[in-house]
Amino acid sequence: MAEPSRPQPYQPGAVSLFFVAKAGVFAAGFWIWLLLLVLRTDAATGAELLAATGAITTTLAAVVLGARMALQRNAATRHAEMRKLLVDISWNAFAAAGNAESTGKVVPFPTVPVEDDRDSQRSRVSVFDRGPGRRDRSSNGDRRR
């Protein structure tokens, strides 16, 4: 049977890829600039130091952003698989509960609780039934010894 079409999971894409590519272009530019400066001059100057710093920094930024994008993509794929498994598990449990022929195979959902003797003797009063300004001091520790 064919797998039903499901919406595609979130995949970090255009924006992350843009920043990785931008950092890569800047890194390539700095490396080319550094190469041209090294080939033209004999002594190290401030421009070469600036080009080297820019090349190293933008290369590291491109690597870090690329790794981050790969980790996000991997996490998004795992998250989509986890959601699919949870939906499949819940659907199978629902189908099993509906198709169960005996009550021994499936744990039924809880129904209305059975009244105990303790429950019938104790009166339960909600906060809204007590009225304004009155407190229930039956079990808040104000007992004298």
Image (tube, rainbow, N blue to C red):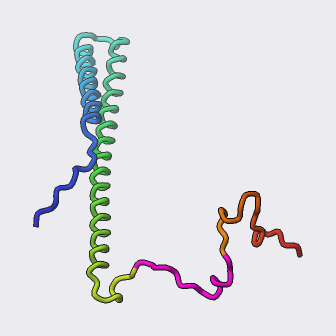
Residue 57 placement (x, y as % from top left): 35, 27
Judged left or right of residue 43, residue 125 is right
Q: Which residue: 27% across, 25% down?
A: 27
Give whichever of 140, 37 is nearer the camera.
140
Say if 33 sits above or below 118 in the image.
Answer: above
Residue 22 placement (x, y as % from top left): 27, 27
Say if 48 sits above or below 116 in the image.
Answer: above
Main secondary structure found in the magenta portion:
loop
Is residue 110 on the magenta stretch?
Answer: yes
Magenta stretch in the rendered image? 109-123
Quadrant position of the C terminus in the picture: bottom right
Q: Which residue: 30% across, 33% down?
A: 62
How many numbered tags mark residues here? 0
Judged left or right of residue 19, residue 118 is right
Judged left or right of residue 37, residue 114 is right
Quadrant of residue 140 within the rendered picture: bottom right
Say if 40 sits above or below 107 in the image.
Answer: above
Q: Which residue: 32% across, 27% down?
A: 58
Is residue 79 on the magenta stretch?
Answer: no
